[in-house]
């Protein structure tokens, strides 16, 4: 049985032991989308929301979520991230917001889950802030765009 699995020799879920892995620079990028009515997106862009700056709040929420991924996703390692970036872009031509996240560290395990969690929580925050205006917003897709560093090598999603 592979040592890089969340299932041990007894068939039980466990946290992977990364003690013997080399520390390398590891980086991951993810994206998420929130699709909404044109009027909801316009309200966000203009900054007219009574709850405040939707993008600023979503950005902070995404950063906080990345730092707490180990507390949210079972079996994830607690990581000391050296960089977390959350970019939000209004795409009026598609009536949506695109969220792109970047997580980086020098360590023994990757940061894919942190990047995905940051993107997901930023999207959920946009939904939460705007649900009084529109409840039928659509979240997704959410996906890993790229990862680098580590034993499993690099990955880049097809565009």
Image (cartoon, rainbow, N blue to C red):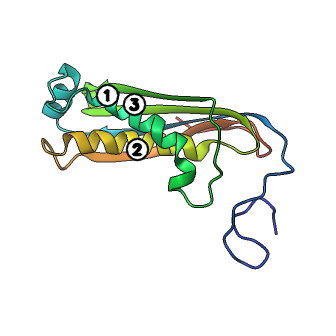
- For disc 3, the neighbor class at 10 Å (few under 14, some 14 to 19, many from 20) is many
Q: Disc 1 versus disc 2: distance between alpha carbons?
A: 12 Å
Q: Position of residue 127 (x, y in %)?
A: 26, 43
Q: Residue at left 74%, top 38%?
A: 107
Q: Residue at left 69%, top 61%?
A: 15
Which disc is residue 59 wearing? 3
Q: Residue at left 37%, top 46%?
A: 140
Q: Indicate whether 144 appears above or below 51.
A: below
Q: Quadrant of residue 39?
A: top left
Badge 1 is on which residue?
55
Asked whether 67 or 134 is in front, the reply is 67
Badge 2 is on which residue?
121
First of labels 1, 2 by sequence position: 1
Asked whether 133 or 67 is in front, the reply is 67
Whether residue 143 appears in this view of the structure is: no
Q: Position of residue 103 (x, y in %)?
A: 58, 34
């Amino acid at each position: 049985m592979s040592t890089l699995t969340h299932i041990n020799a007894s068939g039980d879920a466990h946290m992977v032991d990364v003690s013997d892995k080399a520390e390398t620079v590891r980086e991951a990028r993810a994206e998420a989308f929130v699709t909404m009515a044109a009027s909801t997106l316009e309200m966000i862009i203009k900054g007219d929301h009574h709850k405040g700056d939707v993008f600023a709040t979503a950005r902070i929420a995404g950063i906080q979520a990345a730092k707490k991924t180990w507390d949210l996703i079972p079996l994830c390692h607690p990581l000391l991230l050296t960089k977390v970036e959350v970019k939000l872009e209004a795409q009026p031509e598609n009536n949506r917001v695109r969220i792109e996240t970047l997580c980086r560290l020098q360590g023994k395990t990757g940061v894919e889950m942190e990047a995905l969690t940051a993107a997901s929580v930023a999207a959920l925050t946009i939904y939460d802030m705007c649900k009084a205006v529109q409840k039928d917003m659509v979240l997704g897709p959410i996906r890993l765009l790229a990862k680098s560093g580590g034993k499993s090598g690099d990955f880049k999603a097809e565009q």
